[in-house]
Structures are given as C-alpha cells and as structure tokens.
C-alpha cells in the first residue's frame, strides 16, 4: 500500500468482521494500519458478556485485540463520543 490507508474500526464493523463479512475482510485486506479504541473494545466485552456464547466471544475478542493496535482515550475523546452518540 501507499502508507496512507488507515482505519479506525467501530463496533458494528468488528461484529461484521467476526461474522465473516466478505466486503469488510476485502476492504481491510488493502489497509496499511487498523486501529480500535479502548472504548470500542469495552463495548465488545460488554456484548460478549451478554451473549449466549460468552467464552467463545471473549476468546474471539482476546485474539482480535492481540493482533491490532488499541488506542486509549482521554477525557476529550470521551466527551466527544457522548455528544456523537446523542446526535445519532
């Protein structure tokens, strides 16, 4: 790649990726870097604990998180994230 293709994934995209969505896998195959935020990781853990396949889903998340850059969030990020959720 040209060094410019980076993605910050959200929960819906990761769930689609876990569901073997071909279009998501294809798009990510052509990226240089992929990131998730620690907030999104928290959402995935929350969903896994509420699911009927807790152990399987937790293992999937652990494997995924070990292979990807997880970005931490600061106070400003948290504030902006709440405003964006309220607007959607």
Image (spheres, grey):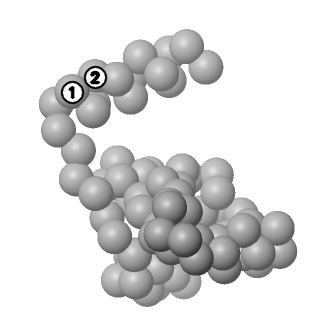
For image coordinates 28% across by 22% down, the residue present is: 79
Q: Quadrant of the C terminus?
A: top right
Residue placed furthest toward the left: 75
For image coordinates 66% across by 75% down, the residue present is: 30
Foreground pick, 30 / 47: 30
Q: State the separation of the CA atoms marked 2 and 1.
A: 5 Å
Residue placed furthest toward the right: 22
**SS type, badge 2:** helix
Residue placed furthest toward the front: 2
Q: Is residue 26 left or right of residue 47?
A: right
Determine crowd level at label 2: few under 14, some 14-19, many 20+ residues with C-alpha closer than 10 A. few
Pointer 2 with pointer 1, Cβ within 8 A: yes
For image coordinates 66% across by 79% down, the residue present is: 29
Q: Position of residue 68 (x, y in %)?
A: 40, 75
Residue 36 seen anywhere in this rendered image of the structure:
yes
Q: Position of residue 73 (x, y in %)?
A: 23, 44
Q: Which residue is mark 2?
A: 79
Q: Position of residue 61 (x, y in %)?
A: 46, 75
Q: Is residue 67 left or right of residue 18?
A: left
Q: Is residue 35 left or right of residue 23?
A: left
Task: Give the image quarter of residue 74.
Answer: top left
Please give the label number shown on residue 33. Answer: none
Q: Is residue 65 above or below residue 11?
A: below
Task: Give the image quarter of residue 81.
Answer: top left
For image coordinates 47% across by 69% down, the residue present is: 3
Task: Give the image quarter of residue 19.
Answer: bottom right
Q: Which residue is mark 1?
A: 76
Q: Quadrant of the N terminus?
A: bottom right
Residue 46 seen anywhere in this rendered image of the structure:
no
Determine crowd level at label 1: few under 14, some 14-19, many 20+ residues with C-alpha closer than 10 A. few
**SS type, badge 1:** helix
């Amino acid at each position: 790649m040209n060094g410019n293709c980076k993605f910050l994934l959200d929960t819906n995209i990761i769930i689609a990726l876990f569901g073997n969505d071909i279009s998501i896998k294809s798009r990510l195959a052509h990226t240089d870097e992929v990131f998730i935020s620690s907030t999104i990781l928290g959402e995935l853990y929350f969903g896994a604990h509420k699911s009927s396949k807790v152990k399987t889903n937790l293992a999937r998340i652990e494997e995924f998180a070990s292979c990807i850059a997880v970005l931490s969030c600061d106070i400003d990020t948290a504030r902006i994230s709440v405003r964006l959720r309220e607007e959607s």
